Amino acid sequence: SNQPSLPRPQSNIQLQSKSPIVAIIDTTPIRQEDLWPALIELGGHEVLEDYVLTLSLTDALRNHGLEVLQIDIETEERVFSTIASEIDIGALNQLLEDKGIGDVRKSQLIWRNAALRKLVKHQVSINDDAVQRMFSIIHGPTYPTRIIVVSTLDEANTVISTIQGGEAFSDIAIEKSIDASASRGGRVNPISTSDPVWPSPIREQISILQVNTISNPVLIGDRWVIIQVTNSPTTSDVEFGEVEPEMRRLATYAQERFLMETLARSLLSKSTIKFIDVDLRRTSRTNTN
């Protein structure tokens, strides 16, 4: 026949692919798509940021002609084991669990740390002052301290008035403080005046406060801190010469950590992500386009 062929009618039925079944509850199948939005809310930003950093580190290593070797992984595992031996293992495991870090993410974290340490190694330079400062932090005077952290100056003044009226500092810390130390009545690890982990205004206050008195409100960032030194400072009778190699090692490690964190922030800030999934976009704080 010479009749022209007619176009076939278009079907209104569109087949949609379904995601894999990941579990079955009784007889009801559960698919990945059923869980995805909630899983993304739970940890999507952190997992994505980790992956972005992994990709950036892979590129940085390649550009510098470096690679993470098994010996580097073993070094990071020893560092992790050292940290675990210095604090309560139950607390460490709870911290990892709270952050959603299991075997897979822990392995990835160790690789990223090994990559970061390798990339900053050439920048590490430890002088005698840094070693002496580490000795002061570890073996110098430390002040048993409690803190209360609040959001406004009015709150801080109210807290001070309440304590001056006879309420226990620890009770008010539990009730009012927004710091993680609140559950411990505001108690933090004893503070050294040489420890840069603590902002200098706090270190200055603990060196002049009388035992069991409280400070005026101290502005740190956008928070107000009230400080109480609860006992006389403790000192160590260890001589510098006895521990100099260990102090040099710790000073090196501290500088490495600072450089590693600085590099990680820099790499993340340079990464731009084009999101396809709306749930992932909604929970992300990473640079987007």
Image (cartoon, helix red, strand yellow):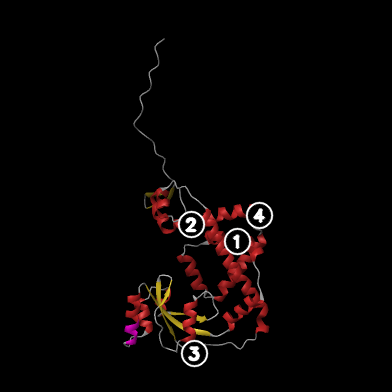
Observer-nearest of 116 and 29: 116
Q: CA distance from mark 2 to mark 3?
A: 44 Å
Dot in front, 1 or 2: 1
Q: Looking at the image, is mark 3 or mark 1 earlier in the sequence?
A: 1
Q: Crowding at label 2, few (<14), some or many (≥20) Cα neighbours within 10 Å? A: some
N-terminal-most mark, 1 or 4: 4
The residue that appears at 63% across and 79% down in the rendered structure is: 132
Q: Considering only order in the chain, which callout, 4 or 2, is on the residue closer to the N terminus?
A: 2
User: x, y percentage for residue 272?
Assistant: 50, 50
Residue that label 1 marks = 116
Helix, strand or loop status at disc 4: loop
Q: Quadrant of the N terminus?
A: top left
Label 1 element class: helix
Residue name at image x 46 percent, y 50 percent: 288
Q: Is residue 80 above or below residue 215?
A: above
Q: Amino acid type of disc 2? A: Val
Q: Which residues are magenta?
A: 160-164
Where is mark 2, residue-wise? 47
Which residue position holds label 3? Answer: 232
